[in-house]
Image: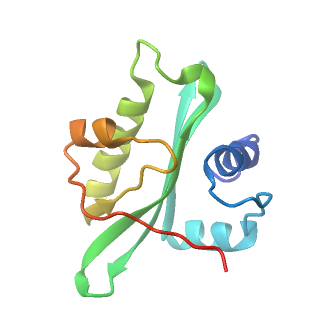
Amino acid sequence: MLAEPNAADMIRSYVEELSPLDEPADPDWQKLFELETEGAYRIWACYVDSTLAGYIAFQISPHHNYKGLLLAMDMGHYLSPPYRNTPGRIGLKMWKSAEVALRKLGVYYIMAHGGQRSLLPFFLHLGYNPMATLYMKVL
C-alpha cells in the first residue's frame, strides 16, 4: 500500500487536516516500509473508480500487558473530503473490511481514536466502547 502513487499525499493530507501539532508532516517512510514488510504495520485502502479515496493504518503487535493477545492500534484513518457523507457509506465499509481482515490475522482487539472531530457516533455504531480520553501536551 505504501508504494501506491498517491499514498504519501493522502498521509500528508491526513496529518495536515487532523494533527493537533503545528508541524509539517514528516513521516518516517523507511520505518513504515520496514514495519509493513514485517507485517507489523498494515494499511487498508479504499478506492472509488480506481482513485485512492481513503485508508486505515494499524500497527499490530502483542499488547505489553497481555503478550498472548494481538492488538491493532489505529495509526491513522482518513477519507478524502469528497467521499465523506456520501450515500455509499464508504467510511463504514472501509472500517468493516479492515476489521474482517484484522480478525483473520488473529488480532484480538482494536484501539481506535477519533482525532480532533468527534467520531463517537461512528465508532458506537461499529460496536466500539469508549474507554479513555487522550491528552496531549507539547513540551
> Residue at point 42% right, 66% down?
134
Seen as rendered, the residue at the extreme top is 87
Task: Report the front residue among 87 and 117.
Answer: 117
> Residue at point 78% right, 63% down?
26
> Residue at point 41% right, 16% down?
88
Q: Measured along the vertical axis of the image, is residue 14 above or below residue 74?
A: above
Side of 47 relative to 91 (left or right)? right
The quadrant holding residue 23 is bottom right
Q: Position of residue 5 (x, y in %)?
A: 76, 42
Q: Position of residue 123 (x, y in %)?
A: 30, 43
Task: Report the front residue among 63 and 135.
Answer: 135
The quadrant holding residue 83 is top right
Q: How many marks?
A: 0
The scheme the figure's colours follow is: rainbow
Q: Measured along the vertical axis of the image, is residue 74 above or below residue 82?
A: below
Task: Report the front residue among 117 and 44.
Answer: 117
> Residue at point 41% right, 55% down?
113
Q: Position of residue 73 (x, y in %)?
A: 41, 65
Side of 80 relative to 38 (left or right)? right
Picture quarter with the C terminus: bottom right
Side of 34 relative to 46 (left or right)? right
